[in-house]
Image (cartoon, grey):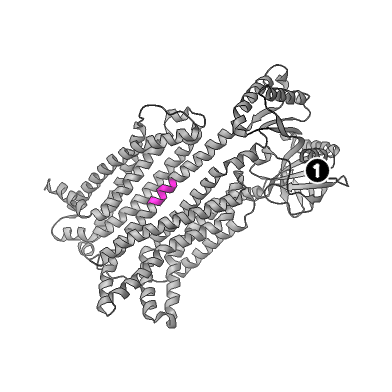
Amino acid sequence: MTRLYPSMAFTNIKNNRKTYIPYMLSCIVTIALYYIVCSLGHNESINELWGGNIIQSYMGMGQVIVSIFALIFLFYINSFLVKRRIGEFGLYNILGMEKGHICRIMALETLFTFALVMVLGLGSGILLDRLVYLVVLNILGASIPLGFYVSWFAICKAFALFGVIFFLIFLNSLRQIYKAKPVDLLKSDNVGEREPKVKWVLAILGLICLFTGYFIAVVTENPVAAITLFFAAVILVIVGTYLLFTAGSIALLKILKKKKGYYYKTNHFISVSGMMYRMKRNAVGLANICVLSTMVLVMVSCTLSMYLGVDDSIDKRYPGQMNITALAEDPLIDEAVAVLDQSLANEGLEKKNEISYRDISFSAVYEESTDEFVTEQSRYEGMDAIAMYNKLSVLVFVPLEDYNEAMDTHRTLEAADDVLVYSNRAPLESDDINVLGKSFQVAETLDEFVPSGNAAANITNSHFIVVKDMSVMYELLAKQTEAYGEHASYMEFVYMTDVAGDPEETEEALIRAYEKASAQLDSGVFDEFSGFLECRPLEAEGFLQDFSGLFFIGIFLGLLFIMATVLIMYYKQITEGYEDKKRFEILQNVGMSHREVRKSIGSQILVVFFLPLVTAGIHVAFAFPFLYRIMMLMNLFNLGLFAVCTIGCFLVFAAFYTIVYLATAKLYYGIVKK
């Protein structure tokens, strides 16, 4: 008997290879991906590179996501295997094998599978890790080192994680075997199903959850509120999706069944009744496909948009190629600008687009009922955090003379309380501004404003307010200092300039000029200087690394979720093929032709499989304005780019989805016709 168990375990795996091989492949891919994220997350060579810590932080997040995904996904896929083999276990039991013997065989099958997938998974991961490592080095602009890196720490973590997962899967299989009676196991494939009942409460609850999530996504205009409500909306949509697929679909089919004029027609009768039982069995799987498809579309389209739009984000965060920010009252400002001018001249660079202005900026909570920007902390201490973030704004005041000079305009303001207003994200709805006990009248809403890197860096909405003269600025500065005390802002001087010539050709000279100017501003007479100098090409590296890291992890996880979608579709086709085989024969026996039966069942499968894709498309369409507002926090204001990326990702994914469907449908018909 000792030799019998390994032989039977190996034979069982061989005989069930149509279901075991895809399962093993999914395990191998998941293990390989987990090894790669662990290896990159603990590779000291990456950590030593400029921006490498950003990549590694994303890899740490990726480890958590892949771990959770692996647990849920492998459990789900294994359930298909166990379901297909319940009758086989029952036969063993009837022929004299005790459940303990069956458990031994299951243990050996699990052990053989675990050993094989770990060897192949880690081997694939080690080989692919080198390729991914080279991609990361290319993103960070680092040189390619010699040698081959193997992370023993990642190998140990992979063995520990997947060892636990396989052990839990084995325990779950034992639970199903011990729970059922031998006769029930043997007849499990032949047990008839009752017509599903309508769970109206769950169906209605699903609609409420789904439309509440949609409502939040559509009506939330403030980007800060969008990011705080994002997870609430996502959870509502996911719950609504599962409830509608499980209960809502049955309710809809029941309604169609009650329409006698529609139901009692040959095609409709077979389709509606067949779809009802399909949705009962497959609702959770279809909901999984829908949720995974939505995650892929959202993740890839957002990260791709940020990656392609990084230049726009950099330009908004650093409006000038050289930027100086200092206290407006600092006596060394002119000397600091002169140092920068001399450094640029020494490198043969000529200035252009030179801009300077003074501003005062501070945060306030907008109270709609009084059109007032509240600065007193005591008045909003008890306010809900989400509500406060939704109303929080940064007010930036600029004198008219500075605005006209910077923008090369000749605007005028008649009264001392007249202002010009520009909003960078959400518009200011009121024509009155009440702040710090002072009232202003909006004379005009502007379409453009002086570039502000500080406002672009701030995730809250910003209102830029042009006041009549410096006397108003000093009055606001005094009131703001009194209101905020030690937390008060100062009046700042902002200076920015570009240099003539092609940015790529002048970049090295610009960086040299920055280094020389910085060295002077950090020593000597400038020890008391309150300002700092920024160089866009140098600062842009951080943006590129951050956005590239997001894009990398987005594509990485997107591939993982696509694999899960493909595997779920594959196993659904196999399961439905074996279940429809007898239905196929019965329908032919009652007089339907082979062509009619195939057309009827084929239409049902087509509807069932493309329903998740259509639903995912609807989810993404409703989420689009919500996601765009979140993208605005990353300084991505290019709506056209985001729309093209989202539509493009959906079309590519739909084409891929169709190819997978056609391939798995061929497998389904092969099973049915046997």
Q: Which residue occupies 33% across, 59% down?
A: 664
The location of residue 427, given as percent across then percent down, is 71, 51
The answer to whether 553 is drawn above or below residue 515 in the figure is below
The location of residue 132, given as percent across then percent down, is 41, 37
Q: Which residue occupies 76% across, 23% down?
A: 335
Horizontal placement of 158 versus 450: left or right?
left
Horizontal placement of 470 versus 428: left or right?
right
Q: Magenta region: which residues?
A: 557-563
Q: Name the residue under label 1.
A: 409
Magenta stretch mostly in which secondary structure? helix
Horizontal placement of 617 versus 332: left or right?
left
The answer to whether 447 is drawn above or below residue 516 in the figure is below
Decide which of 188, 507 is in the foreground and name it: 507
Does the magenta portion include 648?
Answer: no
Decide which of 559, 272 is in the foreground and name it: 559
The location of residue 177, given as percent across then percent down, is 24, 56
